[in-house]
Amino acid sequence: MAANTTNLQNGDGWTHLRNLELLENLQVDGVTFDSVQTATTAHAGGGQTNATQLSATLNNVTVAATAADSVKLLPSALGLTQTVTNNGANAIQIFGTSPDTINGVATGTGISLPAGATAKFTVYALGNWVEGLGNQPDFQTVAVAGQSNIVATLVSDTLTIAAGSGVTLTTNAGTKTLTIASSAAAGTLPAFIARTDATALTAANITSNISGGLGSRYTLSSATGVPITLPLATGTGNVLEFRILTKSTSNGYVFDFGVSPGSNTFKSALLGHPTLAPSAVTNVNVTTAGNHNRMTLLNGQAGTGGDVGDYIKFTDAVTGQWHVEGVITVDTTTATFSSY
């Protein structure tokens, strides 16, 4: 067949052809059927304008020097298909020929094809290439309230599920099942993290220990006290527990937020047992005026706790507010919170 295009057609549409022999490659709408474009180099620097043109049915990208180096598909035509394999070292960006889109993504944005991946593109409607099988019953977007969406741009994209603190994930390829379970034995709590010196326990330390699965329970064993900065309350429901194993006779175990008054405050449900009458229990007073965001447990000082066996819990209840509960040692004067 000559290189020029010829329509073979009768009055009722396309003719039924028998024994049609093609002496040359069949080319329709700019693509040569069953052709292969090998050793293709993606355009360095990326972008749609200068992206390397893919003109074959099967296209093998062998050089992608940097991430997002680019290639582009032919102008869309109904039924047209192109397959792209990325054998380069980095992910490439694939564009349609402007104004064509791929999977509905903006024409100037394109989609990414990871190194080692293959994608097939088909035109079901002029102006839009579709990667994969077209109208598939798959979810493209995973949405979680308050979090950024996870959006699949390729059929070959993989959703990775990570185990958080105290969680185990078990997969069964045969039954295609993912089992999510608690890694802690029933009725058990995370082990206590020991603080044996006066090194500050920062909000970053506390947050890291929670997210890293080390827990949120601490023992305090420093005669010279420990400065403890709580994370800002955001309503996570996290509970921090502190148990005193050693009396602090100087400095004290000081709990605060490291911020100016009013940003975060304590709400108390503490109980105090007087040292002079161990059988008695009194409410620890919280003054009603002002914002209170610092507590010092210092044994031997009027109205403060800090004796061996005292414990205190902080619950991140709502934004800007930690709820406090526990039992601390006091004398005949009840303890109060203070502010900066």
Image (tube, grey):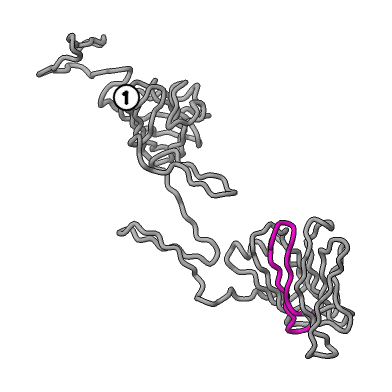
Please, is residue 143 above or below residue 279 in the view?
A: above
Count of residue discs: 1
Quarter of the image that includes the N terminus: top left
Task: Using residue 231 as the reference point, say whether residue 21 is left or right of it.
Answer: left
**Residue at 19% across, 11% down:** 8
- Residue 197: image location, x then y, percent: 75, 75
- Residue 246: image location, x then y, percent: 76, 82
Residue sitting nearer the eye, 4 or 170: 170
Which quadrant would residue 127 be assigned to in this image? top left
Please, is residue 249 above or below residue 82 in the view?
A: below
**Residue at 71% across, 78% down:** 243
Instruction: Write the start and end of the magenta stretch as one range.
Output: 306-327
Residue pointed to by mark 1: 80
Quarter of the image that includes the C terminus: bottom right
Which quadrant would residue 198 be assigned to in this image? bottom right
Q: Residues within 10 Å of mark 1 (few under 14, many from 20)?
A: many
**Residue at 32% across, 17% down:** 29
Task: Using residue 217 as the reference point, say whether residue 170 is left or right of it.
Answer: left
Judge whether residue 304 is colored magenta.
no
- Residue 223: image location, x then y, percent: 80, 79
Residue sitting nearer the eye, 23 or 128: 128
Please, is residue 226 above or below residue 299 in the view?
A: above
Query: Going by the picture, which residue comes out furthest to the left?
Result: 19
Judge whether residue 309 is colored magenta.
yes
Circle 1: residue type: Leu
**Residue at 60% across, 75% down:** 191
Main secondary-structure element of the magenta-colored stretch: strand
- Residue 73: image location, x then y, percent: 40, 25
SS at circle 1: loop
